[in-house]
Image (cartoon, helix red, strand yellow):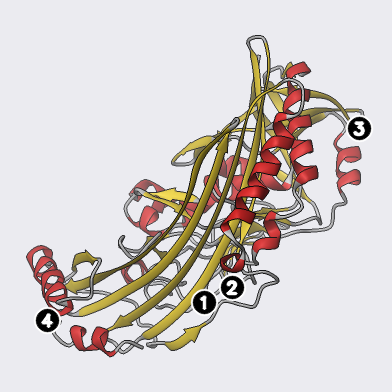
Amino acid sequence: MDASLQNALAQARADYAEIHLERRATTQIAYVGKELEDISQFSSVAGSVRALVKGGWGFVSFHSLDDLPHRVRMACEQAAMVGQTESHLAPVPPAVARVVQATVATDPRQVPLADKEALARRYNQRILAHDHVQTSSVRYRDAAVQSTFVSTEGAEVEQEAVFCGMAVAAIARDGANVQRAFKQVGDLRGYPICEGLDDECDRVVERAVALLAAEPVQGGHYTVIANPVLAGVFAHEAFGHLSEADFVYENPQLAEIMQLGKRFGPDPLSIVDDPTLDGMAGSYRYDSEGTPARPTALIKDGILTSRLHSRETAARMGEEPTGNARAITCEYPPIVRMSNTYIEPRDWEFGDLVADTGDGLYACGSIGGQTDMEMFTFSAEEAFLIKDGRIADRVREVVLTGNVFETLANIDAIGNDLEFLGGLGGCGKEGQFPLRVSTGAPHIRIRNCLVGGR
């Protein structure tokens, strides 16, 4: 541990102060169509000081360790100018730990840049070789981050994480009809996750081309089976953000709705946020405040049981900190964020779920959407009608919309086939994007779901 950080903190005149230092090395490669749009490698050293005085925060970022005590004084002065009441942080035993990245099959830092570019080029050429493909997109990124965190409470935490991921997309066209399909992967388990995606590239093309011939879905209310990708995105976007305590604390209307102990779904429904899962995109051992990571059951057996916290939101709401204060880099202050958020699996086999449905809609993947408080709108990448308990015609332009709490209550079957999705996209909040996270779910069935269409 660099003693200069603790020495600088000794200058702090604050109720609490911390220093966060990061060394980051990143590789990026991007093909768009036939063009190599980006190939770059860069490294950086950056840090920040955060100070708390009478409930007010000061924050100073830096790119040099020179005159670090001055940066500490600046943060304390800022905090003193805005602080007006009392400082409240939920107590956390100060951690002293060194966390090394778990051993992986192939560390992306050991793979030559030329090999990474050749892999991306191979995927790109494979996509472009198909008929009806207008253009393509292949993006690769890896990022190795070594972070150091120290606080005036005595915390000293060093961590290392190496993310690696790939995203491939195909855009197919037939006249004015343009359709898109994609696949992304990404986590902390090493370079092999990006290898062997040739068949996935073919499947992406097949989906995009098949959507050209699909009819737009007829709008109306459907019984919808959501595949693990779409169900996981729903759990994250529509419900997970509502579980972030800063959002709840700052919105009295939402606080009234999100009361712990309230029923939000059927008995089989449980939603968990867990940063301790091995190798997942959103995993870590300590958050950006040095709080130990732990699983948090947001909904347990249909009942709202907890929410995600920083130390400050936990103190303000009289609840326990959960280790969910995160920043995309140390140049940003930590805010309450998800990690690996997923719906727990239950007993339904997929085939039995379809057969039991009768008539409905099977919606797969997600190509975007938005949320506004408890209202959501998501677009599925592709979908199929379900007729007489069998998957039938492919349809497109499927948009699911509704109230998240009504939708949770209408979940009446949960599959046994939990899958997780990581990737390059990440999560955005308050200008901090992309934060590495993963979403997860099995297949789920939702009754009386409003589907927009023709």
Q: In this orientation, which residue lies closer to the viewer: 27 or 338?
A: 27
The span from disc 4 to disc 1 (Cα, nearest Å) is: 29 Å
The span from disc 2 to disc 4 (Cα, nearest Å) is: 35 Å
- Looking at the image, do the residues carrying marks 2 and 4 touch, with CB atoms under 8 Å apart? no
- Looking at the image, do the residues carrying marks 2 and 1 touch, with CB atoms under 8 Å apart? yes
Disc 3, SS: strand
407 lies above or below 232: above
Residue type indicated by callout 1: Arg
Please tell me whether mark 3 or mark 1 is closer to you in this view.
Answer: 1
CA neighbours of label 1 inside 10 A, class few (<14), some (14 to 19), many (20+): many
- The earlier-in-sequence mark between 2 and 4 is 4
Image quadrant containing the N terminus? bottom left
Q: In this orientation, which residue lies closer to the viewer: 153 or 83?
A: 153
- Looking at the image, do the residues carrying marks 3 and 1 touch, with CB atoms under 8 Å apart? no
The span from disc 3 to disc 1 (Cα, nearest Å) is: 44 Å
Q: Which residue is mark 3?
A: 390
- The answer to whether residue 422 is visible is no
In the drawing, does residue 361 fall left or right of residue 40?
right
- Looking at the image, do the residues carrying marks 3 and 2 touch, with CB atoms under 8 Å apart? no
Q: Which residue is mark 4?
A: 13
Pinpoint residue 100: horizontal percent, then vertical percent. Answer: 53, 81
Q: Which mark is residue 276?
A: 2
- The residue sitting at 18% across, 76% down in the picture is 66
CA neighbours of label 2 inside 10 A, class few (<14), some (14 to 19), many (20+): some
Please tell me whether mark 3 or mark 4 is closer to you in this view.
Answer: 4
CA neighbours of label 3 inside 10 A, class few (<14), some (14 to 19), many (20+): some
Q: Which residue is mark 1?
A: 285
The span from disc 3 to disc 4 (Cα, nearest Å) is: 68 Å
Residue 288 found in image quarter? bottom left
- The earlier-in-sequence mark between 4 and 1 is 4
- The residue sitting at 18% across, 77% down in the picture is 68
Disc 1, SS: loop
